Amino acid sequence: MNQDERRRYLIRELLSEDARYREIRVPEDAANQWRLLRSLMNVRMPAPIGAEFLAVQDEFLREEAAAKGIVALSALRLVEPGIYLWQGDITRLACDAIVNAANSGMTGCYAPCHGCIDNCIHSCAGIQLRLKCAELMRAQGREEPTGVAKITPAYNLPCRCVLHTVGPIVSGPLTKAHEAQLASCYRSCLALAQERGLHSVAFCCISTGEFRFPNRRAAEIAVAEVRAFLAKNTDMEVIFNVYKDADLEIYRELLGAN
């Protein structure tokens, strides 16, 4: 199969799973087909699926990743010992682990094509990531608390693993408790990465999007926690991954990377 054939196959298979989707027409162009495929993956509950589907999906997603361009750690700019700053799509990074800003359900974002990092990571990793997260949550038997971390394989992402952490939700004034919870997210991810023998971790801007943590204060906490960890653990390298220009400027200022 080529990419067009794989995409159409995956869409047909997912549409056939649910009688409610029988009237959905498959778009003719590749961009809207990918949007439909991603939407179907996003809304799909964690349930087993056939080996043939997964094999085709894996080929499709890996070719998509290659087309976007995989970014190696060696291509990034070191801004201080052990710390890199990079603006771009975190799902392109070929490091040991990327950090996912998860929600307390821990099985990804179910809103079709939502712009959150949780949705992007699950969409690019493939259906297996949701299945693995659901397995972990069944074993845990309760929602994921704020400020801790879990680890899964990365499946079809170019990194090796995904670290999942639930950041604090700021629904009113920022409090010391919010700050302590965010600091715990960074410490927990770094400790788990070290425990698993990982040597490079890319952090997104945890809690600053849908969870409304003020961007500058979040960056200050992130930089402080990472510097404190690296002062005692010189075998780890950390990438601060930003997407928005505003976050890039904040991190440049804090890291002296102008």
Image (cartoon, rainbow, N blue to C red):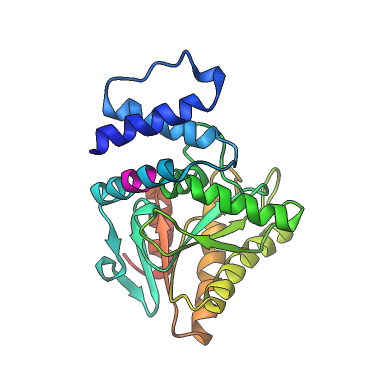
Residue 214 percent coordinates (x, y): 57, 51
Which residue shows up at 68% across the image and 61% down it? 181
Work out whether residue 145 can be spotted: no
Total labels drawn: 0
State the residue in front, 233 or 22: 22
* Stretch of the chain drawn in magenta: 57-61
Quarter of the image with the N terminus in it: top left
Q: Is residue 135 left or right of residue 140?
A: left
Q: Main secondary structure of the magenta part?
A: helix
State the residue in front, 213 or 127: 127
Q: Is residue 199 left or right of residue 176?
A: left
**Against 200, is 204 above or below?**
above
Residue 42 percent coordinates (x, y): 51, 36
Residue that extends furthest to the right in the rendered view of this protein: 141
Which residue shows up at 45% across the image and 58% down it? 154
Residue 74 percent coordinates (x, y): 27, 71
Q: Is residue 56 left or right of residue 127?
A: left
Residue that extends furthest to the top in the rendered view of this protein: 23
Residue 13 percent coordinates (x, y): 44, 30
Which residue shows up at 67% across the image and 48% down it? 169
Q: Does the stretch in magenta take in 74? A: no
State the residue in front, 207 or 219: 207
**Against 124, is 22 above or below?**
above
Q: Does the stretch in magenta take in 59? A: yes
Residue 252's image quarter?
bottom left
Quarter of the image with the C terminus in it: bottom left
Which residue shows up at 52% across the image and 55% down it? 100
State the residue in front, 11 or 67: 11
Work out whether residue 164 can be spotted: yes
